[in-house]
């Protein structure tokens, strides 16, 4: 998904507040999949924290991240399809929709993270 977003001149979505989250949730819900969409938040084993792919900034913790963090599940998805937009740690090799930053808007396509 990082490659897909880069091909569009963008990066995976950086969601820093409730407004960004609401837009991303609506897009994921519109795709009709409970699996969700990749966002640009990745767990760094070196730094031992979640970091935004686009900026390298630490995640500030305004939205809970559920799921069990373990090797291979360090990517974060935003759940769709009526889940309430929950975020969960997920296997980076799974095929999900990619939410890309796009000049202030977010687009989606299906890919692995």
Image (cartoon, helix red, strand yellow):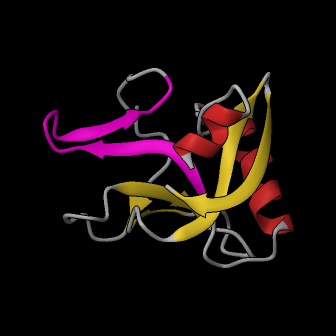
Q: How many marks?
A: 0
Please tell me which residue lies in front, 93 or 103.
93
Tell me what residue is drawn at x 81 percent, y 56 percent: 27
- Magenta-highlighted stretch: main secondary structure? strand
Q: Position of residue 79 (x, y in %)?
A: 61, 67
Tell me what residue is drawn at x 80 percent, y 44 percent: 107
Q: Position of residue 83 (x, y in %)?
A: 66, 74
Q: Residue furthest right?
A: 30
Residue 23 lies in the magenta-colored region: no
Q: What residue span does the magenta drawing correspond to?
A: 38-54
Q: Position of residue 52 (x, y in %)?
A: 44, 32
Looking at the image, is 24 positioned above or below residue 80?
A: above
Left or right of 25 on screen, residue 63? left
Please tell me which residue lies in front, 73 or 8.
8
Residue 45 lies in the magenta-colored region: yes
The quadrant where residue 89 appears: bottom left
Tell me what residue is drawn at x 67 percent, y 35 percent: 7
Q: Position of residue 2 (x, y in %)?
A: 53, 42
Looking at the image, is 89 positioned above or below residue 13?
A: below
Tell me what residue is drawn at x 24 percent, y 39 percent: 49
């Amino acid at each position: 998904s990082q490659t897909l977003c880069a091909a569009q001149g963008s990066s995976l979505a950086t969601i820093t507040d409730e407004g960004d989250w609401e837009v991303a949730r609506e897009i994921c819900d519109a795709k009709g999949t409970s699996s969700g969409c990749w966002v640009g938040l990745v767990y760094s084993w070196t730094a031992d924290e979640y970091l935004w792919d686009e900026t390298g900034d630490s995640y500030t913790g305004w939205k809970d991240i559920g799921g069990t963090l373990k090797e291979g599940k360090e990517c974060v998805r935003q759940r769709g399809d009526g889940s309430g937009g929950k975020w969960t740690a997920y296997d980076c090799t799974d095929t999900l929709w990619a939410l890309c930053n796009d000049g202030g808007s977010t687009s989606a396509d299906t890919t692995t993270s």
